[in-house]
Image (cartoon, rainbow, N blue to C red):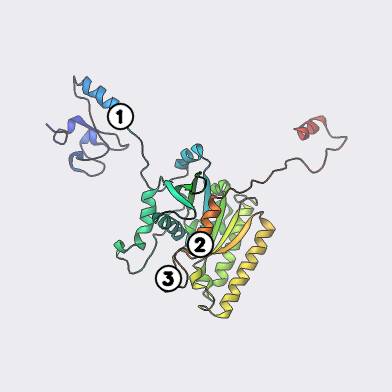
Amino acid sequence: MSDAGNTSLLRCSQPGCTFDVDGVCLEGLPAGKDCPHRIRGIAEGDTESAEESLGTAEKWISLPDGYELSLESTFEITRASNARLIVLAGEADAGKTTLISCVFEQFSEGMYAEHKVAWSDTVLAFERICYRSRISSEAEKADTVRTKGLSPRFFHLQLQSNESGIFSDLLVTDVSGEAYRRALNNQEDALNLGFIKRADAFVLLLDGERLASKEFRQDAFRRGLLLLKALLQAKVLSSQCPIRVLVAKYDLLVPGKVDKNTSQFVEYVEAEYKKFGDENFTDFQILRVASRPNPGSSLEYGFGIEAVLKDWVKEHTEPIMDFKPKVDPASNERESARYLWRQ
């Protein structure tokens, strides 16, 4: 008798599945047929088969499911390697997810930014966000699946340098723009973004489409600055963290495509951010990018993204922290206080 015809000999290793109790498969497969989580149960007197099954199970290799990682599920990667955490921030539709999909699409063609992909725990997650930009989706124009939910999700790439052969693990966050919008208005919501404290680079995207609009440009300009200020005030963003501000969708702001007033406004925005960044951060840059330019644009696909990626995998110099107080303790200070100062 086959396994499919005798459900009493089948069990399921998937948490939450009640197949071994009521015969109902969690995946909805009839009688659990072809379910990858199905294992053979132990029949009475079948100790030899049980030992054989146990030996086979010990040889199984646990593979990731391929979808986005939660904060907790990134710990295995960060424990095993010197992974770099890249935090993408910005308003909804600023282009955060599109940037991630652009990076993956570039690597799908082969070597990119002098690196190649060695491994990824989130291949299916990459494929999902890229789907609507492909012909197979039958969409009228290339698009990107929007990020939902307020919790951070992480995309993983392990890259190998073509020159040195060194491996670099990248964990890139994609958080809903709504989470950052809330952080502007409530410090408690800003504190909920505590994962930013671990960032090796903080990337703020400014929506070029909104900067091109005379109706929305001032709002887009000021909200980015307010977000940086709010995160600094909540102390989830450190002044020592490398900051990269990206003027996204730059294909909509190319001089000659927009009027002189808009070009001057973009230059003003860049100057104001540069001034703020130099005053508050030790490593600050502002760049122009266009992950997916509109058809007919003079900019190539992934304009400016290669330089951004190279910056992510580059080892930045860690600042030397000086914890010694600037003033020596007074001569009449208590000995307990002087001991604390010496430590």
Please tell me whether residue 182 is drawn above or below residue 298 in the rendered image: above
Residue 72 drawn at (x, y percent): 46, 41
**Is residue 24 among the parts visible in the rendering?**
yes
Residue 36 drawn at (x, y percent): 26, 39
Looking at the rendered structure, the secondary structure element under dot 2 is loop
Looking at the rendered structure, the secondary structure element under dot 3 is loop
Q: Give me the disc on residue 294.
A: 3
**Is residue 154 among the parts visible in the rendering?**
no
The quarter of the rendered structure image containing the N terminus is: top left
Seen as rendered, the residue at the extreme left is 1
Q: Badge 1, how many Cα within 10 Å: few under 14, some, many 20+?
A: few
Q: Give me the disc on residue 57.
A: 1
Q: Is residue 131 left or right of residue 332?
A: left
Residues at marks 2 and 1, CA–CA distance in whole angstroms: 47 Å
Residues at marks 2 and 3, CA–CA distance in whole angstroms: 20 Å
Q: Give the residue pinned by disc 2.
A: 91
Answer whether labels 1 and 3 touch (C-beta < 8 Å): no
